[in-house]
Image (cartoon, grey):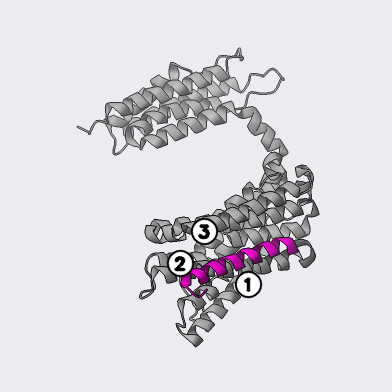
């Protein structure tokens, strides 16, 4: 005798099938044609599917037989239905009705055997796809072939090449792995692609700084590269891109503070005041930059972006990333442990998250909380100086100088606070 599922699973089965049937009848209420399915049919199909599954939950013979019977019934219906004409005189070749009936049948087994979230998620997705027909067709009509090609390129970069690259060191000259290098390239492409999609399909969001804020939560350095490149290639969005660079750095301080607090709450409290203070300064400056910028047409800015993935800029960033890692490894090897402060300054020009995690988890023994706090601030200062360099290189000296100057000032403030914490001044 198989183990019976809880009563709540049966209640979920019944509720979701009723919901699916209700959405089905509401969507086709204006249609005079009779279609199989609805608020009675779908619950019955779901109950039948669930019961047949319980008869043999291992080999699924009764359940499969029931699915074949349903398929034969649907085939007979579709064979007749395809000869009909809709109000526009076109053949009714859609199979949404058939698929919803199959979904209702499968829902019985899913609700009784699988996690509840899966039954809810699949049913909600089916209803949204059914009721969102007009919006989805409108979106499909707006998407050009080049958009599909761009999406394919990004999926190749992130979903095929990245997992295939080794995650282990291939040389003793640097601790950076090929996967980390390619990940840096993918991150730059991802932020550039997200910014492009926002400008192309969501003009209201494109006029704001949300892409820069999200970029700062993951990598303010990569975000700086993308936005600096955009400021140079697209004059219409230059001011917004430069304000975004400052905002991404402001978000960076909060991200680092959160990372530290998760692993060492006492250290997080020690850094809370300077980190939050620096973040507020950056956000205020960004808000002023955004307020003073000239109003641009988001659609015009989107039209000017002809390179959604910014692969060339991403490749340049990856090369610089490797060079910096090689230099950092050489300096550390030649000069030894001359102090965590020098190490922080070196690491800060690349990726500071691994260094911060190492400090927060006690990876460097024999140093005080005060020294760790100062080292983290020095790393952020060094990182801001590197981002200022990126801003000038990719954005152009004349155009990006104001944003680079803000980063330099933030770096000086971080360094001054670190010296004060360390007791040097």
Give percent across and percent down for residue 36: 50, 18
Left or right: where 156 falls relative to 40: right
Give percent across and percent down for residue 102: 46, 28
Element under label 3? Answer: helix
Label 3 sits on residue? 275
Tell which of 192 and 103 is nearer to you.
192
Left or right: where 221 falls relative to 262: right
Give the spatial CA distance, label 2 vs label 3: 10 Å
Give percent across and percent down for residue 175: 48, 75
Q: Are marks 2 and 3 in contact (CB under 8 Å)?
A: no
- Asked if residue 156 can be seen in this view, the reply is no
Q: Are marks 2 and 1 in contact (CB under 8 Å)?
A: no
Q: Is residue 275 magenta?
A: no
Q: Which mark is residue 373?
A: 2
Q: Considering only vertical position in the picture, is 324 above or below 136? A: below
Instruction: Please identify the quadrant where the N terminus is shown.
Output: top left
Q: Considering only vertical position in the picture, is 135 above or below 392? A: above
Query: Going by the picture, which residue comes out furthest to the front?
Result: 425
Label 1 sits on residue? 320
Left or right: where 157 falls relative to 164: right
The tag earlier along the polypeptide, 2 or 1, is 1
Q: Which residues are magenta?
A: 401-425
Tell which of 1 and 274 is nearer to you.
274
The tag earlier along the polypeptide, 1 or 3, is 3
Tell which of 239 and 412 is nearer to you.
412
Q: Is residue 410 magenta?
A: yes
Few, some or many residues within 10 Å of mark 3 (<14, 14–19, 20+)? many
Query: Going by the picture, which residue comes out furthest to the bottom?
Result: 334
Magenta region, main secondary structure:
helix
Foreground disc of the pair 2, 1? 2
Residue 183 occupies quadrant: bottom right
Element under label 1? Answer: helix
């Amino acid at each position: 005798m198989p183990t019976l599922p809880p009563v709540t699973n049966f209640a979920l089965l019944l509720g979701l099938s009723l919901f699916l049937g209700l959405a089905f009848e509401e969507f086709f209420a204006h249609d005079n044609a009779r279609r199989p399915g609805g608020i009675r049919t779908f619950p019955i199909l779901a109950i039948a599917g669930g019961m047949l599954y319980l008869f043999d939950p291992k080999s699924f013979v009764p359940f499969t037989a029931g699915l074949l019977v349903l398929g034969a019934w649907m085939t007979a219906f579709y064979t007749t239905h395809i000869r009909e004409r809709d109000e526009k005189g076109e053949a009714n070749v859609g199979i949404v009705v058939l698929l919803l009936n199959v979904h209702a049948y499968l829902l019985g087994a899913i609700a009784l055997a699988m996690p509840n979230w899966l039954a809810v998620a699949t049913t909600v997705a089916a209803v949204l796809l059914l009721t969102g027909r007009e919006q989805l067709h409108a979106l499909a009509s707006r998407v050009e072939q080049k958009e599909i090609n761009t999406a394919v390129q990004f999926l190749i970069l992130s979903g095929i090449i990245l997992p295939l690259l080794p995650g282990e060191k291939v040389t003793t000259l640097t601790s950076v792995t090929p996967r980390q290098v390619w990940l840096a390239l993918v991150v730059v492409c991802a932020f550039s692609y997200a910014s492009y999609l926002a400008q192309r399909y969501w003009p209201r969001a494109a006029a704001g700084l949300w892409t820069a804020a999200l970029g700062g939560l993951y990598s303010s350095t990569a975000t700086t590269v993308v936005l600096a490149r955009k400021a140079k290639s697209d004059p219409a969005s230059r001011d917004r891109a430069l304000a975004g660079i400052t905002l991404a750095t402001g978000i960076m301080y909060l991200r680092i503070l959160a990372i530290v607090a998760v692993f060492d709450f006492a250290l997080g409290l020690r850094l809370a005041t300077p980190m939050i203070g620096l973040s507020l300064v950056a956000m205020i400056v960004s808000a002023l930059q955004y307020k003073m910028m000239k109003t641009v047409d988001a659609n015009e800015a989107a039209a000017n972006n002809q390179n959604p993935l910014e692969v060339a800029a991403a490749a340049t960033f990856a090369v610089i990333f490797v060079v910096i890692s090689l230099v950092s490894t050489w300096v550390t090897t030649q000069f030894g442990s001359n102090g965590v402060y020098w190490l922080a300054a070196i690491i800060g020009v690349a990726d500071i998250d691994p260094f911060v995690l190492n400090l927060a988890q006690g990876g460097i023994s024999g140093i005080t909380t005060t020294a760790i706090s100062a080292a983290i601030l020095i790393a952020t200062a060094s990182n801001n100086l590197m981002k200022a360099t990126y801003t000038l290189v990719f954005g152009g000296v004349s155009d990006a100088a104001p944003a680079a100057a803000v980063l330099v000032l933030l770096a000086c403030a971080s360094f001054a606070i670190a010296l004060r914490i360390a007791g040097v001044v």
